[in-house]
Amino acid sequence: MRNDQIAAVFEELADLLEIQQANPFRVRAYRNATRTISSTADSIAALVEEKSDLTKFSGIGKDLANQIVGVVTTGKHEKLTELRTQVPDGVLDMLRIPGVGPKKVAVFFHKLNLTSLDELKQAAQEGQLASLKGFGKKTEAAILENIDLAAEAGKRISIADARLAADAVVEDLLAVEEVTQAAVAGSCRRRRESCGDLDVLATSASADAAMDCLAANSLVEKVLMRGETKMRVRLNSGVEMDLRVVPDESYGAAMQYFTGSKEHNVVIRGMAKDLGLKVNEYGVFKGEEQVAGATEEDVYAALDLPWVPPELRENRLEFDLIESGGIPELVEQKDIRGDLHMHTTATDGTASILEMAEAAKKRGLKYIAITDHSKRVSMANGLDADRLRAHWEEIRKVREQIKGIEIFCGIECDILEDATMDLPDDILAEADWVVAVLHYGLQQPRDQIMKRLMTAVRNPHVNIIGHPTGRIVGKREGADIDMKEFLKAAADHGVMMEINAHYKRLDLDAVHAAAAKDLGIPIVISTDAHSVNGFDVLTYGVDQARRAGLTKADVANTKTAAQFRKLISR
Ligand code: DGT
Ligand code: CA
Ligand code: CA
């Protein structure tokens, strides 16, 4: 279990307790635990395995420590299970509405007996919310505006959670004696930013052995359906998973079929037809005769096609690439040499400059930029010009303390709502690396958003636009941007684009990153790490870059430190 998954258990517990109007001290204890667990650099699961004493963490007493051990070892929490029976899922769904927390939800649930997003929406439309004590017309309007997004969000899980669950199941399956092959298919294999359900394929001497293994997996809450060779289960996290056990001679064809996407496969079937072939999940057939099916390579080869990396199978880029000379070698995680967006204790990070540099070096990075927040982000203790200069002085000192990694003096500078930069030009001019970002006023009309982005793009000190749209996957739509005009301007002014690798952001997304590449804009894949574990998310950023068809040459932080320094030298 990853720390953020353990934290999520206690967060849900705190939410449910608060909705049930439990003792506020108890709620706060769970919230503190959540914060501690998600901000520590140590792997809590590893500590539990080593039987380490968890009470060494501030805010974690003996009782909480025991509860954490229980969650890590069983994947469950008794009190949470009980609370879930008292509070309908639909009530928890309300928490996904921006600006709605457990206190408001408690009122909806207890005062108005509302138990789903639909009921809440209807109550808001009827003006019932505005008449509640402590609520007003404005709150009611905001809820109405955001409720559909919240309804959509609940249905899919992040690629990070998807990969973790799918990989665990696959690893388990591969340990079964009868199982010869197992792998994830579907949107998870394509590395979509979110997954509706998980799809796993296996070959096995006994289909039952494979299905028994999944049924016994501690991640599985319930078997929903079990047939001769296929099974559907619901995991503890709520997401559902399909397992299909297929014959060896069909494994490649089944992988190809169930990896999708549907759109990619429509084209594949059409191409097969043109060649007088038929392709389905069992193989490629010429009349009755199977001509391919054991491996995916064979399936594609039978159609005169190169094997297509799963990340590209969206019928977006892959067929054009094949036609115009073949699919290039896509960027890989091992190509990444630098990380150009991260935070320290100077603002809202949890590690010092030196700790971040050491952690980055340990992961094989050759250069980093420290990019703490500018002053507008006051809740993160954002830096004004004086503090920033002092911070850079610290960075210069750290450079003396660590060899083998170059540290750039950077800043994540807000582009303010009035289309000015949060810090004056003279200090931006002193930076090695300026990441300009929108944090506030993301809902402004397109004209104003564009004005802000243009201010940043035209500023001679800005190197890159960070998480350009500001979207949060499945939760918040990005700002209203004329992408074409924005990217064109960035290309004209030599401003780079970030793919923020955090699985909640993945911004730019694959479509826009591909558009940026077309304009020759260098892309930087950055982790936006707020802790030494924050570097973990790099893999998700690389996946999105691959989905955008990016090669090593398209990604600026694959350059050597010397090349990169040269690229940004003023
Ligand atoms: P998701 O689960 O919504 O994130 O997206 P996928 O792509 O994983 O979709 P899913 O789980 O419904 O199906 C997995 C793959 O199986 C899909 O990409 C293509 C294939 N597939 C599933 N159902 C059908 C179908 O009815 N027709 C065709 N042609 N392919 C299908
Ligand atoms: Ca799926
Ligand atoms: Ca499925």
Image: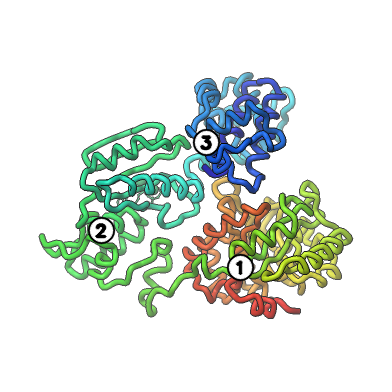
Q: Quadrant of the C terminus?
A: bottom right
540 w.r.t. 237: above or below: below
What kind of residue is marked 3?
Val
Whole-angstrom CA distance, mark 3 to mark 2, is 37 Å
Q: Which residue is mark 1?
A: 524
Crowding around mark 2 (Cα neighbors within 10 Å: few <14, some 14 to 19, many 20+) is many
Front tag of 3 and 1: 3
Q: Quadrant of the rendered structure where residue 359 is? A: bottom right
Q: Earlier in the sequence, mark 3 or mark 2?
A: 3
Asked whether residue 34 is in view, the answer is yes
Q: Earlier in the sequence, mark 3 or mark 1?
A: 3
99 w.r.t. 402: above or below: above
Question: Which numbered dot is residue 370?
Answer: none
Crowding around mark 3 (Cα neighbors within 10 Å: few <14, some 14 to 19, many 20+) is many
Q: Is residue 234 left or right of residue 256?
A: right
Secondary structure beneath disc 3? helix
Residue 132 appears at what percent x and percent y?
69, 23
What kind of residue is marked 2?
Ala
What kind of residue is marked 1?
Val
All told, the count of numbered labels is 3
Whole-angstrom CA distance, mark 1 to mark 2, is 36 Å
Question: Which numbered dot is residue 72?
Answer: 3
Q: Quadrant of the rendered structure where residue 98 is? A: top right
Q: Which residue is mark 2?
A: 253
Task: Say which of 120 and 363 sits in front.
Answer: 363
Crowding around mark 1 (Cα neighbors within 10 Å: few <14, some 14 to 19, many 20+) is many
Q: Earlier in the sequence, mark 1 or mark 2?
A: 2
Q: Residue at x 67, y 39 (%)?
A: 35
